[in-house]
Amino acid sequence: MLLLLRKINGIAIFLCCLSPSLVASVSSEGNQTQSDLEIIRIIQPGIFDVRTGDYLIRMRAWGISFPKHGQPGYDAALSYTEKKLVSTKPRITVKREFDENNLKVVEVEHSENKQSFSKEAIALGVGWHNESETSRFGPYLMAQLKAKRMKLGIWSTEFDYQGLPGTQAPVPTLPRLYDARQGFVPSLSYWVTSFGKIHRPDCSFYERGRGQLTTKPAGTDCRICGGRKPKR
C-alpha cells in the first residue's frame, strides 16, 4: 500500500510504505540499485529525492550527520551535497528500509570512481561519522580521525554540535603525584587499551573500549596521537 504525499510537476512523491513492485529499481537491504535512479533535488545536507520512473523516493546518506540549519558549516554542507549529488546517477545500496523519519537510509557511491559520498564528506570535515549507525565502520572512522587531526571543516570550530563526540577535546585526567618540594603536582595520564595501545588525552581513542589509565604506560604508541611521543 502506498502513502501519497503530494505531486510536484506531475510526479508523485512517496516517503513511506513504498510498494516494491512500483519501485523495483530500489534494492532490498545490502544490494545495489539499478542505474536508472537519478538524484534530482537536495532537501538538506545528506537528504535528497531520487527519481525512479514516475516516482520520487526521499533518502538519507548512511553513516554521516551534518550541521543543522543555523549551525556553523551548514551552508558549506548543503553546497557540498548539491555539488556532489544533484543530477547524478550514483550507485545506491540500501542500508535500512526506513528510519524513524520514514527516510530510506542508503550508501551512495559515485558511479565513475566508486567513491563513497559519506566517506568523502567525513574526510573533508563537511560532516561527522555517525558511529552508532555504522557500528564504528573502519573506513569512516579513519577518515574522521584524519579530518580532526588536520582541523578541517567542522573540526576547525569550537561549536558543540549537540554533544558531538570529539568536537571538543577531552579533558585530560590529571592524577596528582607527591613532590617533596612542591607538594602534590599534576601529571599526564595515558590510556592503555587491553591490546597494549597507548593513547594521549587528546586522542579520539582516549578512554574508548577496554583499558586503563596510567602515568607510566607500557605498550605500543598510537600512530594517530603519538602516545608517549606526541606528534607536532
Image (cartoon, rainbow, N blue to C red):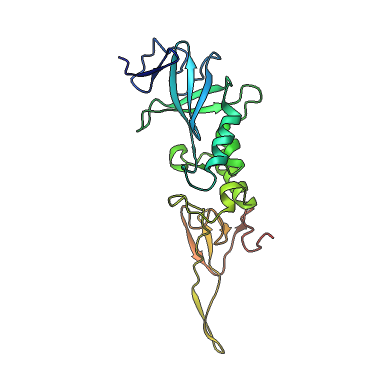
Q: Residue at x 52, y 42 (%)?
A: 74
Instruction: Name above or below for residue 113 compared with residue 224.
Output: above
Q: Residue furthest front?
A: 9
Does 107 sit above or below residue 175? above
Examine the rendered structure and indicate whether residue 151 appears above or below residue 105.
below
On the picture, is 206 further left or further right than 228? Answer: left
Q: Residue at x 44, y 38 (%)?
A: 133
> Quick check: 90 left or right of 70?
right
In the picture, residue 201 is in which quadrant?
A: bottom right
Q: Position of residue 84 (x, y in %)?
A: 60, 29
Identity of the residue drawn at 39% across and 25% down: 97
From the top left corner, tell me how far across and down residue 33 is, in percent: 51, 17
Image coordinates for residue 71, horizontal then vertical, percent: 49, 47
Q: Return the residue found at the far bottom.
A: 181
- Image quarter hosting the C terminus: bottom right
- Foreground: 206 or 100? 100
The mark tally for this picture is: 0
Height in image: 7 above or below 151?
above
| Residue furthest out toward the left | 1
Considering the image in quadrants, where does the N terminus appear?
A: top left
The image quadrant that residue 8 belongs to is top left
| Residue 206 picture location, percent across and down | 52, 57
